[in-house]
Amino acid sequence: MEKLIEYLSYPFVRYALVVGVLIALCSSLLGVTLVLKRFSFIGDGLSHVAFGAMSIAAVLGVTNNTLIVLPVTIVCAILLLKTGQNTKIKGDAAIAMISVGALAFGYLLMNLFSASSNLSGDVCSTLFGSTSILTLKTEDVWLSAVLAVMVVLFFIFFYHKIFDVTFDETFAKTVGTKVDMYNVIIAVIVAVVIVLSMNLVGSLLISALIIFPALSAMRLFHSFRSVTVCSAVLSVICAVVGILISITAGTPVGATIVAVDAVVFVVCYTVGCITGGKIV
Amino acid sequence: MPYITGNHLAIGYDGKEVLEDINFEVNKGDYLCVVGENGAGKSTLMKTILGLLNPIKGELIWGDGLENNEIGYLPQQTIVQRDFPATVKEIVLSGCQGRMGWRPFYSKEEKALAMENMERMHLQSLAKRSFRELSGGQQQRVLLARALCATRKLLLLDEPVAGLDMIVTAEMYALIKELNDDGVTIIMISHDITTAINYADHILHIGKKCFYGSKDDYVNSVLGQKFLMYSERKEEENEWKN
């Protein structure tokens, strides 16, 4: 406990906590609609796209690689979410295709052109998250704070519209809701959150941040509102606990958070089975 | 002037024509049943009326003060909805989404409207229940209440009794008839011609040959008699199988 208090006096630890909580909050909010729209794997797919874009940026020697990674990821997110329903290649297959494709090209590029001597180390840290969350600067904290506030505001103001386009797109279209527009906005937010959270958990584990809290909440609650709120709360708690454990025990940050999320899911599942999921 | 007039309408998707030269009218207070074999183009016609597809040729004319987003649509259920965490109240209220515009929350009037329609569909006691726990018939009533929140004028029902057992099916038809008697115009897509004839006052038969007219004319027409006999035979076959 004393050790923990001592660690918390370091600014970088506080930054890590703040950013971790914000990213967990954003991804869990998005997770509810993505899981319900059967797009659970979009996090995984897009994070691989971001990985591919990152290696292009590294090869080109661009210093601020967000400039390349973000637009590429946004374009892919829009393509996947917009055309997921009615195209010749169905949603899950399209995600799988883009995901493995981007991963392969990214690794290939890094292998062929990388100037770094520690290639597998580089790849490993992009995929599984590095210690970069512990080396955040004040600007990074502000950036994620602004983005998180925007995502939360979007969710509050468009809560009902998000419900409408998630529950029944066709009905929403017939009463004049601009379904395509909302889908594009959701896609853009997903892309932004994913690129952001690559700093935290790395690209492979982003899916976990999106899926676990939503699924845990769905075991316990039966209304859309409660599921959304519960998912956000669970995700934030898991992120705080995960980061604290990883700091004190010296475990990798991303993997620890996901492990905590998984444990919470098992607990929620059990509770859900016992209560029969009767809590509204 | 009718609510909707189909004038030499040709429908299809991706530029491919499925069906052409459809003529029909939907007047205020009508109960129109759209029948036809599987694959005849019933869903395509429905999507065209809803504005999800554009007509390939011909035109759909809206009249009598009906705007084309004033159709209450009862869709067939999707896989997504089977395990969706939402309460009955949340779903019925979402029928008011078209009235909101950019306003982020529902107003008192909209909430009152949702309550009223829940009562109309006998759902008050289920308001806080989860949609995924309900029986098929209850779920259809929830979606019907949602459609009623969207409009008072015209309902478009896509196979409203699909997957329901006989008793619930009869209840559902009675409920729809009750709405029609209250002045709600009904367009119902169905492959169940026998009930169509019991309840509807107009029939639109689509297929290789199309027919539009009153129920009595349809029953006396060659096409109608053929289709009725065909359906009866099919029903008997099904009964044999069971």
Image (tube, coloured by chain):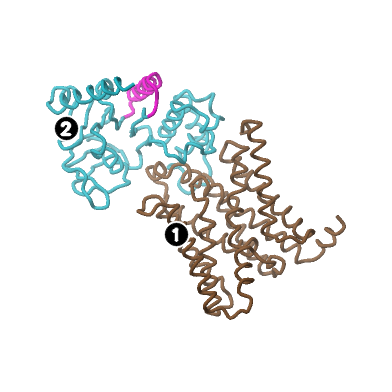
Chain colours: A brown, B cyan
Q: Nearer the viewer, residue B214 or B210?
A: B210
The quadrant of the image that shows the C terminus of chain B is top left
Over which residues does the magenta segment extend? B163-185
* Dominant secondary structure (helix, strand or loop) of the stretch shown in magenta: helix
- In three-dimensional space, the C-alpha distance between marks 1 and 2, rounded to whole angstroms, equals 47 Å
Q: Decide if residue B187 is in sight here.
A: no
Instruction: Tell me which chain the residue with mark 2 is part of.
Output: B
In the rendered image, residues at marks 1 and 2 fall on the same chain: no
Q: Is residue B23 left or right of residue A242?
A: left
Name the residue type under label 2. Phe
The image quarter in which residue B129 lies: top right
What number of labels is visible?
A: 2
Q: Is residue B211 left or right of residue A183?
A: left
Q: Name the residue that disc number 1 marks.
A: A97
The quadrant of the image that shows the N terminus of chain B is top left
Query: Which element is circle 2 on?
Result: strand
Q: Residue furthest right?
A: A2
Q: Nearer the viewer, residue A175 or B224?
A: B224
Name the residue type under label 1. Met
